[in-house]
Amino acid sequence: MKVLPLLCLAACLLMPAAAQAASAVLQGLDKITARISTFEAPLGEAVRFGSLQIVARACDKKPPEEPPESAAFLEIVDVRPDSPEVALFTGWMFASSPAVSALEHPVYDVWVVDCKKDSSSAAETIPE
C-alpha cells in the first residue's frame, strides 16, 4: 500500500535539477487562535507548526508556460510530550486543490502555497 507514494517520490527525485525546488512554502492555520502562518519547509528537514512535525520530501512547480500548479510530498506527524507520535498525513498536497488531499486534524490545517528554489540555484540560472 505504501508503494505508490514511494514511486511518486522516486519519480520526483529523478527529475532534472532545474525542476526541483529546495523547499516547500506552506501555510498553516491554528483553528484555536484563527492565525495563519506562512513558513518554509526545506526538503528533508523537519519543521514544527504547533504540535505538528512536517517533513517535505519533494516539491514540484510547473513551468510558467503551463497552468500554474505546485505540489509537495509531505509527511506530517503529531508530536506531543505526553503521548506517542501519531502519523497524520503522508502524500502529495496540491496548491490549486487543497481539499483533494487535506490534513485531518482538529486544531491545525496545513496546505501548500508554492515551491521555492534556493538562492544559489537562482543565481546560477541568470544569463550573463
Image (tube, rainbow, N blue to C red):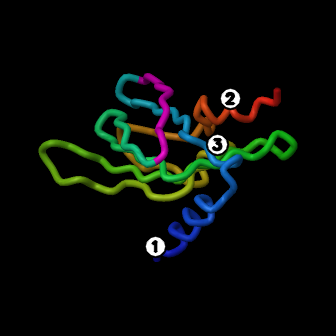
Residue 111: give its label.
none
Mark 3–mark 2 Cα distance, whole angstroms, equals: 26 Å
Which amino acid is tagged 1? Answer: Lys
The answer to whether residue 2 shows anywhere in this view is: yes
In the image, what residue occupies the spot 46% across and 25% down? 37
Find numbered disc 2 in the image and state the secondary structure of the residue it sits on.
helix
Q: Are marks 1 and 2 in contact (CB under 8 Å)?
A: no
Query: Which sits in the foreground, 56 or 90?
Result: 56
In the image, what residue occupies the spot 51% across and 32% down? 27
Which amino acid is tagged 3? Answer: Ala
Left or right of residue 62, residue 46 in this image: left
The answer to whether residue 97 shows anywhere in this view is: no
- Mark with earlier residue (3, 2): 3
* Disc 1 packing (10 Å; few <14; some 14–19; many ≥20): few
| Residue where numbered disc 1 is placed | 2
| Residue where numbered disc 3 is placed | 95
Question: Magenta segment, which residues?
Answer: 34-43
* Disc 3 packing (10 Å; few <14; some 14–19; many ≥20): many
The relative height of residue 44 versus residue 26 in the rendered view (above or below) is below
The relative height of residue 126 versus residue 108 in the rendered view (above or below) is above
